[in-house]
Image (cartoon, rainbow, N blue to C red):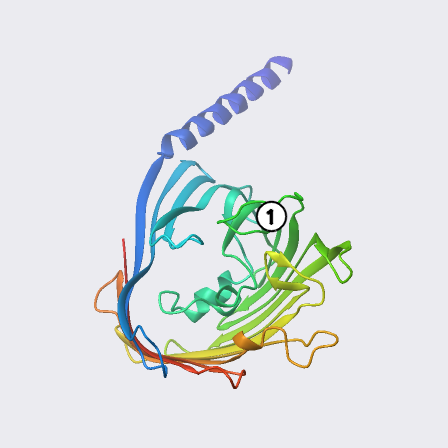
């Protein structure tokens, strides 16, 4: 009996080693280069504008993904863009992350990671090469930051994210106080419906009235719902709120921003579609003031156009972009764009 048990154990151990060796043999490390460019020509019809038209490259991304082992992937992406110093093109580190699929229900990413505040909204909007999604466009959040995040599959319909990041974005990776931003999101997806709620908080010392310093906590709330009625038509709406901040990375006591965004697309076939979007941005009025603190940037934005995608990896669009300002002393913006995206 004892020998029989030993024999069975040896066979089990051998089969285990064989299965492990087979797994290793089945996996081959591999990598892939990727790139994306946003190009446009625009004509500015705003009254009094000096620069009427221009060709631009707004963004150029260059990256590499490498599958190290099963469930383990490394990614790096460079973002070529203008910097605060005015240089036309500067390469920023947009992504440098290690992604580990711990199980079928848990995935962990760390390093310079993509954030989750508006990733689903941007994907549903579908025209990042024309205009950023609301949170990104008006400074409610950043698309990447240094930190760690975990994604959890809770059920067939529900998933959640939790994260800790520096909070300054990928162009300025950490402020002097060393405090982090923490947050989470919950997403529901079922057939054509997607709904999402997101929240985060971060704090910093700020100078208030009288010249004294105090800790102020800023928070962001993002809600989103979208529905694909068919392969032809999709519609979405967002509500977003930033409290105690003039921007996601700039904590400021009692300075709030809020806004809404609505967008829709109708697809005629694989090559042609029309789209439209409406944004509304506003801010609060500070104590003792008569005008809203962000009046010069508050207003309504309209974007509408038609997209043509002749082949995989190439998209182009003719569109109108207007911004009607709440400040009566400022001219409304009115522009016509021809946008192009090509990627590999």
Residue 202 percent across, percent down from the top left:
68, 54
Residue 7 percent across, percent down from the top left:
55, 17
* Residue toward you, 240 or 45: 45
Question: Residue 83, relative to residue 273: is it above or below?
Answer: above
Give the residue drawn at x 36%, y 49%.
Answer: 90
Q: Residues within 10 Å of mark 1 (few under 14, many from 20)?
A: many
Question: Residue 164, relative to residue 249: is it above or below?
Answer: above
Give the residue drawn at x 46%, y 28%.
Answer: 20
Residue 206 percent across, percent down from the top left:
71, 55
Looking at the image, the residue that sits furthest to the bottom is: 328
Residue 6 percent across, percent down from the top left:
59, 16
**Which residue is identified by label 1?**
165
* Residue toward you, 194 or 334: 334
Question: Residue 68, relative to residue 50: is it above or below?
Answer: above
* Residue toward you, 333 or 226: 333
Looking at the image, the residue that sits furthest to the top is: 3
Give the residue drawn at x 74%, y 76%.
Answer: 288
Classify mark 1: helix, strand or loop.
strand
Give the residue drawn at x 32%, y 75%.
Answer: 50
């Amino acid at each position: 009996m004892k020998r029989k048990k030993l024999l069975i154990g040896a066979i089990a151990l051998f089969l285990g080693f064989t299965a492990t060796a087979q797994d290793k043999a089945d996996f081959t490390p591999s990598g892939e280069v990727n790139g994306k460019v946003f190009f446009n020509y625009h004509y500015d019809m705003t009254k009094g504008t000096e620069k009427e038209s221009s060709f631009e490259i707004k963004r150029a991304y260059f990256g590499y993904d490498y599958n190290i082992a099963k469930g383990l992937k490394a990614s790096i992406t460079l973002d070529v863009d203008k910097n605060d110093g005015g240089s036309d093109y500067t390469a920023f580190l947009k992504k440098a992350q290690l992604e580990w699929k711990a199980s079928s229900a848990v995935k962990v990413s760390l390093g310079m990671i993509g954030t989750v505040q508006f990733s689903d909204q941007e994907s549903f909007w579908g025209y990042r090469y024309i205009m950023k999604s609301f949170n990104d466009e008006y400074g409610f959040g950043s698309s990447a930051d240094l930190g760690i995040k975990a994604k959890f599959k809770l059920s067939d319909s529900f998933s959640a994210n939790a994260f800790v990041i520096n909070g300054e974005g990928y162009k300025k990776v950490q402020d002097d106080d060393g405090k982090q931003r923490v947050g989470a999101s919950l997403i529901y997806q079922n057939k054509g419906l997607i709904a999402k709620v997101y929240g985060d908080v971060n704090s910093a010392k700020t100078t208030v009235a009288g010249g004294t310093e105090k800790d102020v906590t800023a928070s962001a709330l993002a809600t989103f719902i979208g529905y694909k009625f068919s392969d032809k038509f999709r519609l979405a709406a967002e509500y977003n709120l930033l409290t105690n901040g003039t921007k996601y990375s700039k904590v400021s006591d009692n300075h709030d921003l809020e806004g809404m965004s609505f967008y829709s697309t109708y697809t005629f076939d694989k090559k042609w579609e029309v789209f439209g979007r409406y944004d509304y941005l506003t801010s609060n009025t500070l104590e003792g003031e008569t005008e809203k603190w962000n009046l010069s940037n508050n207003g309504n934005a309209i974007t509408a156009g038609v997209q043509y995608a002749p082949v995989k990896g190439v998209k182009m669009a003719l569109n109108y972009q207007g911004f009607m300002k709440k400040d009566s002393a400022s001219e409304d913006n009115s522009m016509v764009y021809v946008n192009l995206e090509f990627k590999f």
